Amino acid sequence: MLAGRLPRPRWPGRPVRAVAAVAAVAAVAAVAAVPAAGRAIAAAAQAASAQRVSYRGYSFEVPRSWPVIDVARHDRTCVRFDLHAVYLGSPARDQVCPSSLVGATEALLIEPAPRSSVVLSVENPVARQIRVIAPQIKITATFDGKPGLICQILASASLPAPVPYVPDPDDAARSPAASAAAPPFAAEVTDYHGLGFDACTAPDTAYMSAWRRASPYRAIGVYLGGSDMACAQPNLTRRWLSREAAAGWHFIPLYVGPQAEFHQLGRHPGHQGRAAADDAVTQAERLGFAARTPLYYDMEAYSPAQTRKALRFLSSWTSRLHVLGYSSGVYSSSSAGIADLARRYLGRKYAMPDIIYDALWNGQRNTTDAVLRSGEWADHRRVHQYDGNVTQTYGGDTINVDQDYLNVSLPAR
């Protein structure tokens, strides 16, 4: 996460949409003006700009400019969805990822799957993610503004177009898989007073064990999902969470969806906030986080011009989580989302989160911030990210992390 860094950062891998839009309009106009013979030449040029990627009996046509990375041959490669790329193979359990990554664009992860797999192709438009299962392979694809490009790549391998599926927490809770799963974690697994850290991808169990023995941390931030989740999460399963909870770890469940600074909040940010909350609860239930658990929205630093949209989005996020039985947390920069919420703490226009996660990289291991007045998110309702992008080694295992100080204990309802 980058919200604690000033000045406000620019994220890698993000397209400049205005330039892209102008280029797209120009391209359409150019094609319309070209006769049939010219279009054939243009098609040939497009084919020349593509490359063929073969994997487990399938052949994909992808942009030539995209790197193709064999994960098995590049030990501990970070599978990043914030850069155009094709990843072949399953991500390493101990992949090395920078903690500061935020954002997603068009990218594919193609992994092995059983030969007997039944074909399934589904698009989650809220998370901007497409998942495909077919004999021998499974695909996780992300997209920013070009879902059609992903569909085109799938079609080049004779795979079906995805069917849109909008997450519904009620459906997830009633599913046979949910009924057969182990009982959910108590909400108290997210309560803690002390030091924690967050990383772009959930660490391997061996790393967690080493850090449990040798580090001062006892809480970890984990990303459940979201349209701007930049890193693959091969370790983050219900089993992993159960094991780490039993080992004494506490959790900060994070969801990183549309960003104000990326101009992803449209004309109806309240509707987007509600949709993000539905998706977050669906993912939380899948992983075993029970009702009352705080789910933290990661809203990175944004400019003052985006304040109104950001507040409408976050208010809707909080209101919807409460309707669904979950508590609301908001992560943001001290100078952006946290300050904006604090200014309106006593008002009634916007719903306030139950917990604030304050990104203020001042190195202070406490929950004090000048933008927060006495009584605002008091009584164990604050998390402070006091430093970020720090590489640390404990027990011989190294992780790039953001550092947190938690004072969280929500009352039972």
Image (cartoon, rainbow, N blue to C red):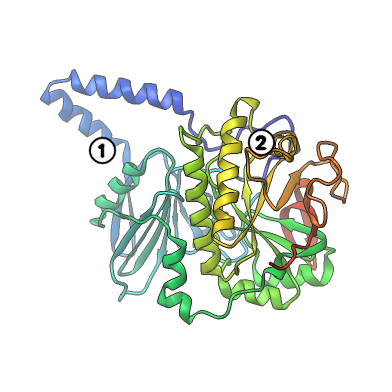
- Residue at the location (56% across, 41% down)? 313
Dots 1, 2 in contact, CB < 8 A: no
Residue 310 sits in which quadrant?
A: top right
Residue 208 sits in which quadrant?
A: bottom right
Q: Is residue 77 visible?
A: no
Question: Looking at the picture, how far across and down is residue 412, in whole percent?
Answer: 72, 68
Question: Looking at the picture, how far across and down is residue 399, in whole percent?
Answer: 72, 57
Question: Looking at the picture, how far across and down is residue 270, in whole percent?
Answer: 51, 41
Please name whichever residue, 279 or 312, is drawn nearer the observer in this view of the structure.
312
The secondary element bearing badge 1 is classed as helix
Q: Is residue 373 visible?
A: yes
Which residue is disc 2 drawn over? 301
Q: Which quadrant of the figure contains the C terminus?
A: bottom right
Residue 119 sits in which quadrant?
A: bottom left
C-alpha gap between disc 1 and disc 2:
40 Å
Q: Which dot, 1 or 2, sits closer to the camera?
A: 2
Q: Amino acid at mark 1?
A: Ala
Residue located farthest toward the left when viewing the structure as drawn: 36
Q: Amino acid at mark 2?
A: Ala
Which residue is disc 1 drawn over? 47
Question: Looking at the picture, how far across and down is residue 53, in whole percent?
Answer: 34, 52
Label whose residue precedes the other's in the sequence (1 or 2): 1
Query: Relative to 39, does residue 67 appear above or below in the rendering?
Result: below
Please name whichever residue, 84 or 226, is drawn nearer the observer in this view of the structure.
226
